[in-house]
Image: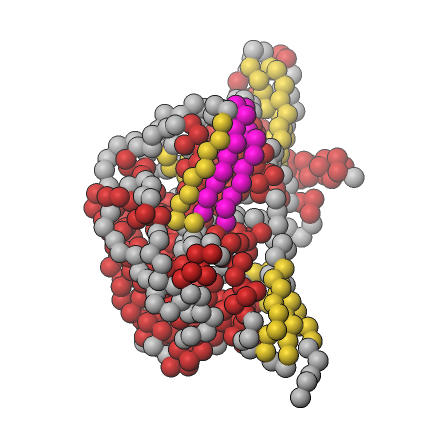
């Protein structure tokens, strides 16, 4: 009774998570070269990606994680040698609808031929920040829904 | 007076079966006439899944067998692949394996001890052991990023080096461990009701233990001195000094006490491993795509529940042709039917709890 408390009042108080914590994934789309190493390392085929050839390079157009099948083992993050895929500390991934579980990290159009030379233009969708990303996710979700039905 | 026997289903959803496990009890009044264990509710087909995965990709699945001693499950599997490949694991990785493996053993025994106390009716003991297990789980989270499904071992080494701040926290835990064990001894082992419920209940004589192929604390509680870490040392266990705690009577009480004693020994092992922890690489040089030569390998390690074996057949491709796991919980369960006969329903709970099964491993 005199001992210190060992519990915390969760939503108000949070335990600090370690740096290696396996939370929701983050993808740095600028670093990703769409090499598929992560997708091939995954035991459960969680990662699905689409890519297009722009100039000489592969360009990532879509990166979807079927997170409902993910074991959070980290083999994908370990496989990426471009340091593009990371774990974040977000663990609250609950959704009310199954369709929303799917994690869409990148969903963007192929840049037009003439624009491809302008690096700034290619990078725009990824660097726009969270507001842009949210819109993309929303767009991607409806696309995923259509795909499933 | 002759009465009719009747059937009672214990489980599959019953907190005292430690998972989804069913025992069909044929009872005469309150006395068991026949007990038929029905495992299989948690079968996921890990062995079959492994055939469609590359050698590295199987590792996360092994976590999910004995999820209470996840590191040891990883270890049993990678050991077999390493034997098949013929790779030599670097010193530092060997010592790290011992450290995390023994931590896993302590975590597993903490659950065994705590849940056994709860089975017998003392829920307080359960809370104490879970409080302390949390510290190990936190250490694992710091080391691997996951609390239970660690996937920390790699073929030829381990995934990551020890992070900063890991060793001081671990040392603090190890310093506290003997005190914690004393606390459990005082709270649970010394309790008169607990002793009355467990002493001379479910006795397994040594010959029967051997005939049933029991292993781990269940075997040693019957007084048979057999621990793979001593009898057939793997890794660096031959360089570590520890004792193998033995029981005398082979009853529920001895099986329980054996686990607390083993925790103390594991603490000693980790302390030595920490002291001797060398610098160096944590991963042997293995090819990116692992293609062991065609052939087969079988290795065994001493897991927290007993001897965990892994048998792999390779056909020379990058996926195992066949994997089989010898899961100690499943084999230890073999004697349950015979042990229960003649005891009352409440004792069945005591006997089942003392065998310390984990259903992820029983059903695999
Ligand atoms: S964490 Fe594991 S299961 Fe999840 S996507 Fe990565 S490799 Fe696949
Ligand atoms: S391994 Fe890395 S760089 Fe390659 S596709 Fe995956 S995230 Fe992109």
Task: Report the residue at 43% width, 49% height from top.
Answer: B307
- Which colour assignment does the render follow? secondary structure
Question: Along the horizontal axis of the image, is B215 left or right of A117?
Answer: left
Residue at the left extreme, as displayed: B275
Q: Is residue A18 visible?
A: no
Q: Quarter of the image containing the N terminus of chain B?
A: bottom right
Task: Report the residue at 54% width, 37% height from top.
Answer: B323
Q: Is residue B304 magenta?
A: no
Residue at the bottom extreme, as displayed: B1
Q: Is residue B176 visible?
A: yes
On screen, B72 above or below B252? above
Instruction: Give coordinates of residue B314: x percent, y percent.
Output: 52, 28
The residue nearer to you, when weighing B148 against B104, is: B104
Magenta residues (range): B308-327
Question: Along the horizontal axis of the image, is A95 left or right of A142?
Answer: left
Instruction: Give coordinates of residue B56: x percent, y percent.
Output: 49, 33
Q: Quadrant of residue B277?
A: top left
């Amino acid at each position: 009774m005199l001992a210190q408390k060992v519990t915390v009042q969760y939503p108000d108080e949070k335990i600090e998570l370690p740096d290696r914590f396996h939370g929701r994934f983050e993808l740095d789309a600028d670093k990703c070269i769409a090499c598929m190493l992560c997708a091939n390392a995954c035991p459960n085929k969680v990662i699905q990606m689409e890519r297009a050839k722009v100039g000489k390079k592969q360009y990532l157009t879509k990166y979807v994680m079927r997170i409902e099948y993910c074991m959070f083992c980290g083999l994908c993050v370990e496989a990426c040698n471009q340091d593009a895929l990371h774990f974040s500390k977000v663990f609250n991934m609950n959704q009310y609808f199954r369709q929303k579980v799917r994690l869409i990290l990148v969903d963007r159009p192929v840049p037009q031929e003439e624009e491809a030379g302008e690096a700034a233009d290619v990078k725009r969708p990824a660097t726009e920040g969270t507001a842009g990303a949210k819109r993309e996710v929303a767009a991607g979700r409806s696309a995923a829904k259509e795909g499933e039905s | 007076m002759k009465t009719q026997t009747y059937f009672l289903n214990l489980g599959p959803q019953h907190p005292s079966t430690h998972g989804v496990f069913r025992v069909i009890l044929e009872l005469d009044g309150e006395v068991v006439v026949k007990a038929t264990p029905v495992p299989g509710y948690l079968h996921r087909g890990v062995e079959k899944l492994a055939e469609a995965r590359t050698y590295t990709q199987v590792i996360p699945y092994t976590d999910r067998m004995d999820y209470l001693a996840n590191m040891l499950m990883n270890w049993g599997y990678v050991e077999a692949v390493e034997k098949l490949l013929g790779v030599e694991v670097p010193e530092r990785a060997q010592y790290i394996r011992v450290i995390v493996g023994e931590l896993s053993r302590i975590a597993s025994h903490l659950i065994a001890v705590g849940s056994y106390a709860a089975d017998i009716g003392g829920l307080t003991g359960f809370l104490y052991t879970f409080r302390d297990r949390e510290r190990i789980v936190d250490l694992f989270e710091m080391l691997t990023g996951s609390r239970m499904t660690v996937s920390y071992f790699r073929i030829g080494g381990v995934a990551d080096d020890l992070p900063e701040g890991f060793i001081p926290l671990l040392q603090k835990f190890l310093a506290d461990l003997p005190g914690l064990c004393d606390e459990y001894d005082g709270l649970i082992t010394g309790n008169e009701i607990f002793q009355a419920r467990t002493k001379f209940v479910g006795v397994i004589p040594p010959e029967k233990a051997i005939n049933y192929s029991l292993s781990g604390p269940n075997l040693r509680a019957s007084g048979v001195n057999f621990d793979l870490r001593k009898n057939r040392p793997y890794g660096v266990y031959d360089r570590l000094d520890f004792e193998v705690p033995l029981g005398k009577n082979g009853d529920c009480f001895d099986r329980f006490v054996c686990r607390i004693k083993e925790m103390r020994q594991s603490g000693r092992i980790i302390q030595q491993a920490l002291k001797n922890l060398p610098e160096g690489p944590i991963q042997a040089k293995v090819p990116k795509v692992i293609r062991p030569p065609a052939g087969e390998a079988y290795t065994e390690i001493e897991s927290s529940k007993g001897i965990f074996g892994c048998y792999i057949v390779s056909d020379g491709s990058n996926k195992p042709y066949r994997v089989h796991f010898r899961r100690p919980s499943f084999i230890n369960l073999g004697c349950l039917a015979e042990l229960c006969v003649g005891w009352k329903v409440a004792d069945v709970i005591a006997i089942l709890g003392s065998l310390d099964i984990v259903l992820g491993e029983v059903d695999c």
